[in-house]
Image: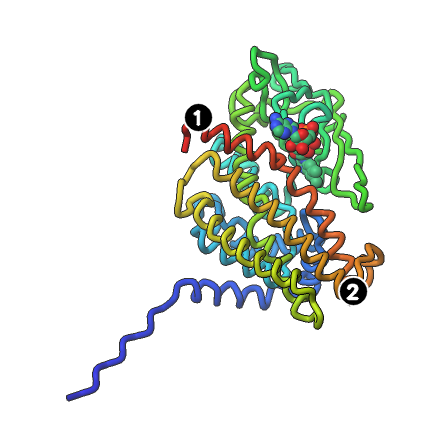
Amino acid sequence: MPAPCPLPAAIDPDEVFLAEVRAFLAEALTPDLREAGRRTLGVHSDIAACKLWHRRLHRRGWIAPGWPVAHGGAGWSPRERFLFDRECALNDAPVLFAGGIRSLGPLIIEMGTPLQRARYLPAILSGDDLWAQGFSEPGAGSDLARVATRAVQAGDRYIVDGSKIWTTGAHLSNRMFALVRTSTGDRPQQGLTFLLLDMATPGLTVSPIITIDGEHELNQVFFDQVSVPVANRIGEEGQGWAVAKRLMQLARSNNTPAALVRRVYQRARNAALATEDLEPGLMARLITAEIELTAFEQTELNLLPGGRLRDGDATSPSVLKLIGSELHQRVAELAMEIAGTARGIALEPFRDEDGPLADGARATAKHFATRAASIYSGSSETQRNVIAQAFQAGIR
Ligand SMILES: Cc1cc2nc3c(=O)[nH]c(=O)nc-3n(C[C@H](O)[C@H](O)[C@H](O)COP(=O)(O)OP(=O)(O)OC[C@H]3O[C@@H](n4cnc5c(N)ncnc54)[C@H](O)[C@@H]3O)c2cc1C
């Protein structure tokens, strides 16, 4: 009797996808870009490296993994997006300055006019336009509806006066989206309008805010009679609250992706394995972190837009933001402690030096930088309020 033909081995689609990604990264992620990725302390890598990496991803057609193909995206499934992000993180790819890709672009696809899509999406994809987020004000943070920056319509323009604060990368951006007040109503959420601005408009000035670590990521932005075309409004006048809420959902969905946490975790793990007499307590915490991170990765796969569970659930972005940012903080703190055990935790010098001391100091700086993760894009208390209110209202 002839021997039965062996069945062809099942092809694992993840492996096929990863092989393509790895081949691209091996070529496009040059040593200088990997070094910029490794040195990232704040919310994005060195801006020159960000721009270069953005352009390479754009040329490959992979700069907007979650956007529909019809709008220039890769059209990947949540699982492909997850695998790609993780592979980039494990290979020290630069962390992009890409609010346009992550939140404004998807918002314009959903809520913009055909003209706005045609005008703004190509420059977001190419990286020619970098967008800052102008929501927070000196008197409006968690209570964002208290926005007081005024926009008064004059013909086909709005004239904007006021100021925005904590604006990440305003000094690097050529455009800004902003929530402004066009009228007052019974509730503060009424009378808000969502505008797209050109940062080069006369009357708009950017003033740096230098944080305690000596870094310049944040700014205050002032508007003095800044003229904005009415055509740059997203949604109807006075309906800006709904637009801003949607923007925040999009932003929170990928504000702290699991890949960002895995990046820090991996470094902590490598340092722990290279340390001969690591405190047993630190190893136990590392194992706990691995378990929590794996659980978060599964949660992300479930809750990402288009994911396995609850597509379109209003609370999923807050769940992802809350778990991701707090886990990021715990892992960064652990990385600092592991580096400290072996090498001391001096903060300086780390910018221009390599070697163990610089690694330890960077871990310390990263720990301090992640403290802000539970504040920006809405504090942890804000996320808990969103989730609790949805439960109370019986949404879930
Ligand atoms: C690094 C960084 C980058 C940022 N980038 C940007 C940006 O690019 N664009 C932008 O628009 N904004 C940005 N922000 C601002 C950020 O969104 C606000 O800091 C945040 O929303 C909190 O507002 P606040 O600072 O005014 O604090 P507050 O609102 O005054 O809150 C102070 C404290 O009170 C708590 N609290 C407030 N209200 C409640 C409540 N109802 N229930 C329970 N607790 C409450 C808060 O959780 C917080 O702990 C950034 C902030 C940081 C730190």
Q: Which of 222 and 368 is in front in this view?
A: 368
Q: Which residue is drawn at 76% across and 25% down?
A: 203
Dot 2: element: helix
The residue furthest front is: 280
Residue at image position (71%, 48%) is 42
Q: Which of 129 and 163 is in front in this view?
A: 163
Kind of residue sitting beneath label 2: Arg
Coloring basis for residues = rainbow
Q: Mark 2: few, some, or many residues within 10 Å (few <14, many ≥20)? A: some
Q: Which residue is drawn at 39% across and 66% down?
A: 12
Q: Is residue 7 above or below residue 116?
A: below
Q: Farthest left residue?
A: 1
Residue for badge 2: 343
Residue 394 x, y percent position in the rendering: 41, 28
Q: In this view, does 87 lie to the left or right of 200?
A: left
Which quadrant of the frame does ligand 1 lie within?
top right
Please identify the quarter of the rendering in which residue 130 is found: top right
The spot of residue 367 in percent (x, y) is 71, 51
The residue lying at 74 percent from left, 48 percent from top is 368
Residue found at the very far top of the displayed protein? 186
Q: In this view, does 344 lie above or below 317?
A: below
Residue type at tag 1 = Ala
Quarter of the rendering occupied by the N terminus: bottom left
Q: Tell me the CA gap for discs 2 and 1.
A: 51 Å
Numbered circle sitting on residue 267: none
Name the residue beneath numbered marker 1: 393
Residue 275 shows in the view:
yes
Q: Looking at the picture, how far across and down is residue 294, in whole percent?
A: 51, 56
**For residue 346, side relative to residue 125 (left or right):** right
Around disc 1, counting alpha carbons within 10 Å, would you say few (fewer than 14), some (14 to 19), or many (20 or more)?
few
